[in-house]
Image (cartoon, rainbow, N blue to C red):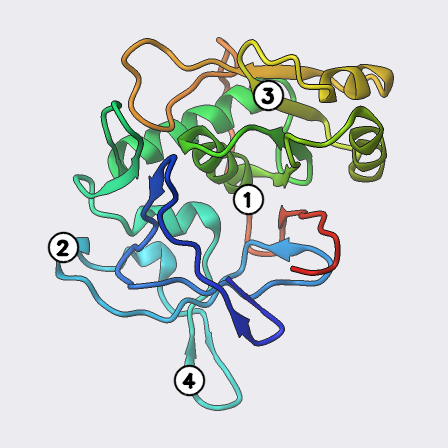
Amino acid sequence: LQRQGKKRKYKNCKIFTFTLYLFCNEYHYNWRVPYATHAATPNWTARPSAGPMPESITAAGTADSGKTITTMTIRTLLDAGADSAIALTAPDREAMTYAVLRQHVDSVGRQLAARGLGRGDRVAIVLPNGPEMASSFLAVASFMSAAPLNPAYRESEYAFYLEDLAPRLVIVEAGSDNPVRQAAAALSIPVVEAVVGNGAPAGAFRLFDEETDTVPADTGDEALVLHTSGTT
């Protein structure tokens, strides 16, 4: 990630690995303050296995320096991954390929659309570190705005952040008794559990049974709202 000229890299953690390389060794997003939008300009380093760049993410303009600017959304970034390439892994679970990740992201987008959510709406995500946290962010941010919150917050902290963010929905782990439930209930914000099926690959979950057609977010739409202590 890139913010104020400083590059930060998130490497594999002990709980899961998340490879979003899509042709490149590392991705640097340009953060918008106070919000991040879908527009991103990656520094490409080609990987032979990734295949050709999809037409949906070809160059969109030229900077003052004369360098080509490639404008993409979260969803079109995912289109660049080869179908069989590994996107998400977790211990003792089947890996999720980019083909399956795209299907999952689109399915979650349709599930949210069936509940009346779409571009311009915010969804808070309160999940522990793991593949579902990664895939839920990608799914939500592909169609609307994702607002990840620390699962270790107290109820009073959740109350503050939820009131400030005004999300339309909060996603929690199945069976979780996280205090965000009480904070959301006090603000009349619905809560849904991310249910992982038996034998599901890393990152796969379901929110609702119903689905309806929808369209991904555009480059000018809000993709991420991240509350921080000011030190990140």
Q: Classify 10 Å Cα crowding around label 1: few (below 14), some (14-19), many (20 and above).
A: many
Q: Classify 10 Å Cα crowding around label 3: few (below 14), some (14-19), many (20 and above).
A: many
Q: Secondary structure at mark 4?
A: loop
Between discs 3 and 4, the one toward the N terminus: 4
The residue positioned 55% from the left and 44% from the top of the image is 217
The residue positioned 35% from the left and 48% from the top of the image is 12
> Residue 152: image x %, image y %?
66, 31
Q: Amino acid at mark 4?
A: Lys
Q: Secondary structure at mark 1?
A: loop
Residue designated by label 1: 217
In the foreground, 161 or 67: 161
Q: Secondary structure at mark 2?
A: helix
> Residue 179: image x %, image y %?
73, 19
Between discs 3 and 1, the one toward the N terminus: 3
Q: Classify 10 Å Cα crowding around label 4: few (below 14), some (14-19), many (20 and above).
A: few
Which label is found at residue 172?
Answer: 3
Between discs 1 and 4, the one toward the N terminus: 4
